[in-house]
Amino acid sequence: MSETKSSLALNGGHAELGRLPAFPSWPQSGPEEERGLVEVLHSGKWGSTHGDVVATFEREFGQAQQARHAVALSNGTLAIAAALRAAGVGVGDEVIVPPYTFIATAAAPLFVGAVPVFADVDATTHLIDPQAVEAAITERTKAVIPVHIAGNVADMTALAEIGRRHGITVIEDSAQAVGAQWEGRGVGTFGDLGTFSFQTSKNMSAGEGGIVTTNDDELAGAVYSLVNVGRVPDGGWYEHAAVGYNLRLTEFQGAILRAQLARLPEQQAVRATNAEALHEQLAGVEGVAVATPDPRVTAHGHHLFIFRIPELGRRGLRDAAVRALTAEGVPGVSTGYVPLHRNTALVAEIRALAERLGQPVPESSCPRADLVSRDTLWLPQHVLLGTAEQVAAVGRAITKVAQAANELA
Ligand SMILES: *Cc1c(COP(=O)(O)O)cnc(C)c1O
């Protein structure tokens, strides 16, 4: 038998992206962001209490997402906390969340004195499983927070129906799903409230920022009040009808976000084309699992490109796979989340809160989150802004690495 040289770049083979230009960087901006910033600077109206740029952005974002109201605030984490408080969720209530998400989804309930309860995800899509949600409901349940992970959309038909039937508030954590739609309608409009993030990595960014959407006038007023130290829309400066935080965005952020929203459709179209090509390329590759979105997902948010390589997970070779993909020239490869029911800080806080309230500490068995957390890899959204040639090379690199388990061991 002849000796074959490794084809992996890690072991001296040809790097699939070796001769291609660097991927587009993130965040991106142009003359529109620059002009907006300078206009705010020269206007002297730097805060949203005096200017109207944030208010204009709120109207534009609400329109784009097909929500009646949109209230901008400082970040996506406090957007969830504000949505919970606006809906009257508080001390001792239980809030159902998925374990496979960013920590903010489970931290926000704790901020308002509520106990997060984990409901497992679907192993194919990494999205919260409506049946697991239903099974986690107790007489203390006040809200559920489905997360549109990666920009894919949770089953909002089933989840909204569960919310109505049990009288619990549904808050869509749409931090990764700006522009996404379910059956032709924007996410953040199926639940009672939706929340978005404009942190640096997100598909629209102002460095930091967030927004809450709702079709409910009263909830919109309550969020506005929480963002604005308890003020009422069109009320007096020292008229505080409630006790609220100050979570306002600056006009500078508003200006950047108006420009980011305007460039979003074009960027999303590029991401969609590239994601579909990569999906097609990997669909036939043995050992690589890529979820096909539900046909009711009429627009995918394309925040992450998620895939699983089960054999590498079983053999504990995922970190080696990341090194191999990086050596091929694939940027930003991530092993994704440690599931939140395994996060010791969260688990300790949940236990301490439940004990202090004299309530049962919720059970959290999430075997599917455990499974996917061992073999999931993802690429960040800006990889999907590359050229067709770059994305095809990424597909070849993934294929090569997925089939090289024996070389990685
Ligand atoms: C980014 C993110 C958040 C938090 O948003 P920040 O603006 O960073 O506070 C919440 N949930 C999910 C799923 C996220 O990806």
Image (cartoon, grey):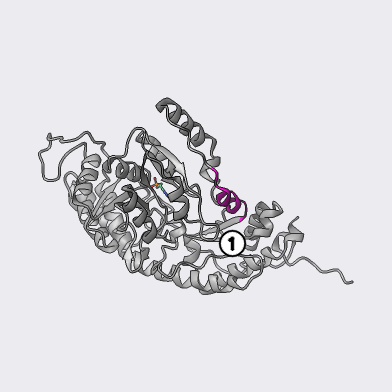
Residue toward you, 162 or 105: 162
Q: Pointer 1: what residue?
A: 330
What residue lies at 10% left-to-right and 39% top-to-bottom?
236
Q: Is residue 128 visible?
A: no
Q: Is residue 42 above or below residue 30?
A: above
Residue 371 colored in magenta in the image: yes
Residue toward you, 164 or 338: 164
Q: How many marks?
A: 1
What residue lies at 74% left-to-right and 62% top-to-bottom?
12
Image quadrant holding the C terminus, namely bottom right
Whole-percent x and y of residue 376?
58, 56
What residue lies at 73% left-to-right and 57% top-to-bottom?
408
Magenta stretch, main secondary structure, is: helix
Instruction: Give the magenta-colored segment's residue range.
Output: 365-375
Q: Is residue 331 above or below residue 238?
A: below
Whole-percent x and y of residue 347?
51, 35
Name the secondary structure under disc 1.
loop
**Is 297 positioned to the left or the right of 52 in the image?**
right
Image quadrant holding the N terminus, namely bottom right
Q: Residue furthest right?
A: 1
Whole-percent x and y of residue 47?
22, 44
**Is 326 positioned to the left or the right of 45 in the image?**
right
Quadrant of residue 289 within the rendered picture: bottom right
Residue 400 colored in magenta in the image: no
> Is the residue marked 1 within 8 Å of ligand 1, measured from its CB?
no
Q: Is residue 313 visible?
A: yes
Residue toward you, 213 or 264: 213
Q: In the rendered structure, which amino acid carries the disc numbered 1? A: Val
Q: Is residue 254 above or below residue 354?
A: below
- Label 1 crowding class (10 Å Cα cut-off): few <14, some 14-19, many 20+? many
